[in-house]
Image (cartoon, helix red, strand yellow):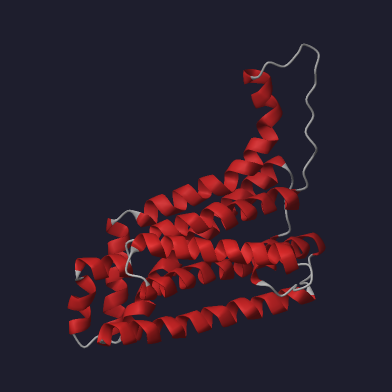
Amino acid sequence: MQWRTLFQKEMLEHWRNKKWVWVPLVMMLVAMMDPVSIYFLPEIIDQVGDVPDGMVLEMPALEPVEAFMMSIEALSTYGVVIITLMMMGTIAGERKAGVTEIILAKPVKFRHYLSSKWLGFISISLTSLVLSLGLSAYYVALLYGSIRLYPLLLTISLYSLWFMFVVTLCIFYHTICRSAGVVVACTIGTLAVMAGVNAAIGHKATWFPNNLSTHLNELLLTETIPDALYGTIGIILLLILILSVAAVKIFQRQEMV
């Protein structure tokens, strides 16, 4: 009952803050922008650019999987920023406003407080992800060709683990830092470092979390699950578990001091 009340409070707050509206809309725009703009780029240049008479601009034809993966790559970059900014006013903001002290003054368990926030942001993030990639798949099917439904649904499901990891990482930094700006910097900085490490050793450490998109691309192309994908999924799930447990322990220690 206690957890349900906290979760309902989070969902109501997200609705009042219009996060259920602007987050899906922005992510859908991000997801469909690259496949659509690349397809119509020759016409756009012909209409607004100074193209010499007789010159024919031909863009290399994209396969449906390539076009769809452009949406995933865009969400891996801009979607992460959107999620991080969406979560700016959560624990760090409530601490600054004194809301956390009021809530925890009641017999509220720390894990209930954090997990209700975690699931609230997960709900928005995954709903936005499904809508975004669903819209992208629709436009890819119209412009480039269709992708088989089973590997497409499996790809979207597995890619959702990356968004879950980002939300968990952000919650973790919210329990450590009391400044929303510092939380954003630490979250994006950590993801940037991970991307740099993956660029350096990703070809050897195929299980590294940032290789998820690469494995999903192979899944769509071959319609079979690559062996390395299992390791990557396992590492991401392990990181989510470790960060979740650490967040509860750190938050409890800080609030009890």
Query: Where residue 92 sits in the image (x, y, percent)?
Result: 31, 68
In front: 239, or 60?
239
Q: Is 237 or 257 nearer to us in this picture?
A: 257
Q: Is residue 216 visible?
A: no
Residue displayed at 36% across by 85% down: 111
Q: Quadrant of the N terminus?
A: bottom left
The residue at the point 78 percent across, 25 percent down is 57
- Which quadrant of the view contains residue 176? bottom left
**Residue 18 x, y percent position in the rendering:** 33, 53
Q: Depth check: give the residue in front, 80 or 8.
A: 80
- Residue drawn at the location 63% of the way across and 62% of the way down: 195
Q: Residue furthest top?
A: 53
Left or right position of 249 against 210: left
Quarter of the image holding residue 110? bottom left
Left or right of residue 183: residue 225: right
* Total numbered labels placed on residues in the image: 0
Q: Is residue 38 visible?
A: yes
| Relative vertical location of residue 251 with respect to residue 37 in this rendering, above or below | below
Q: Nearer the viewer, residue 25 or 45?
A: 45
Q: Quadrant of residue 234?
A: bottom right
Q: Residue at x 74, y 60 (%)?
A: 217
**Relative to 89, residue 161 above or below:** below
Quarter that holds the C terminus:
bottom left
Q: Is residue 64 above or below residue 241?
A: above
Residue 62 percent location from the top left of the image: 77, 43
- Indicate the position of residue 40 as horizontal and vertical percent values: 67, 32
